[in-house]
Image: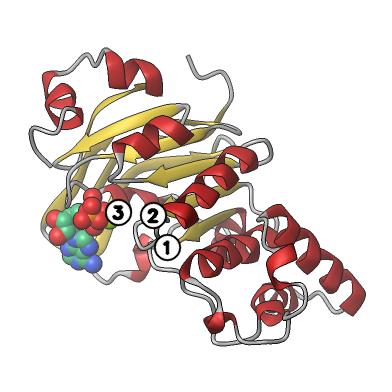
Amino acid sequence: MITSPKVETKNLNLYYTENQVLHDVNITIAEKKVTALIGPSGCGKSTLLRCFNRLNELIVGTRIEGEILLDGKNIYQNGMDVVDIRRRVGLIFQKPNPFPKSIYDNIAFGLKIGGMKNKSRISEIAEKSLIDTGLWEEVKDRLHTSALDLSGGQQQRLCIARALAIEPEVILMDEPTSALDPAATFKIEELVTQLKNSYTIIIVTHNMQQAGRVSDFTGFLYLGKLIEFGNTNILFTRPKEKLTENYISGRFG
Ligand SMILES: Nc1ncnc2c1ncn2[C@@H]1O[C@H](COP(=O)(O)OP(=O)(O)OP(=O)(O)O)[C@@H](O)[C@H]1O
Ligand SMILES: [Mg+2]
């Protein structure tokens, strides 16, 4: 079904000290498609997302078993460069978290850390990232004012622009619109649809309509297990598992 996998997990188990929260997860994420992860609170969606760029290992007591392949290579293998993995796989959080810096510096920061010195190149990339996230017209006259003065939706798009600037291959989004109003949510959804032409996107959402609108594939997690995975239209209209059907029809969660 998925012809070009970008990311794959193989028998992934994750423990927070003694507590196992992911159980034998095998999921394949298609390149340049949007994959939605759905499931009730506490089922392990954020945990799974954090595994994809090794952010989980910043949490003391975390242990994983199994493999996560990025372009066929296990990112947990000895000798893999974590900084490089996190550059290739960016994460957008639930609450917009711009740096307390100017709009421009939010984007320039990552580039400078990465060693870029050429100011005009940095400006070009900043402009392109802001254009790609639909923010440019809204902020071009205030690039040097604080990012914290932007609206919530604009801040979230700035965080996406900041992620795009360092040219990731995969973008992880953990409930990116749950703190936003419907208009700002619509803009992010439009953006996701547009970004999949160039990036592989994995989005966690509690909103089933949103999963239906933006994703090509959907995985349903329950108590740390991947219960069902498939084409979004099929999963929402003809789920194979009773648990999936109960969840998507709002019987629990
Ligand atoms: N840092 C942590 N230390 C210990 N246990 C954790 C930690 N983070 C999450 N857990 C536990 O792991 C399980 C999965 O949590 P996770 O945050 O991945 O769920 P989720 O599906 O993202 O939930 P939500 O929809 O509420 O965001 C839960 O039982 C949670 O209590
Ligand atoms: Mg979560």
Q: Which secondary structure, mark 3?
A: helix
Which of pointers 3 and 1 lies earlier in the amino acid sequence? 3
Asked if disc 3 is less than 8 Å from ligand 1, the answer is yes
Residue 145: percent from left, percent from top: 67, 87
The residue sitting at 47% across, 54% down in the picture is 183
Residue that extends furthest to the left in the rendered view of this protein: 251
Residue for badge 2 = 174
Q: Is residue 210 left or right of residue 2?
A: left
The colouring scheme, among rainbow, by chain, secondary structure or one colour, is secondary structure
Callout 1, which amino acid? Phe
Callout 2, which amino acid? Asp
- Marker disc for residue 47: 3
State which quadrant residue 3 falls in: top right
* Mark 3 closeness class: few <14, some 14–19, many ≥20 residues within 10 Å: some
**Tags 3 and 1 in contact by the CB under 8 Å rule?**
no
Asked if disc 2 is less than 8 Å from ligand 2, the answer is yes
Of residue 135 and residue 15, the one placed in the foreground of this image is: 135
Q: Which secondary structure, mark 1?
A: loop
Residue for badge 1 = 93
The residue sitting at 36% across, 53% down in the picture is 175
The Cα–Cα distance between marks 3 and 1, rounded to whole angstroms, is 13 Å
Ligand 2, by image quadrant, is: bottom left
Residue 238: percent from left, percent from top: 26, 12
* Mark 1 closeness class: few <14, some 14–19, many ≥20 residues within 10 Å: some
The residue sitting at 49% across, 58% down in the picture is 91
**Tags 1 and 2 in contact by the CB under 8 Å rule?**
yes
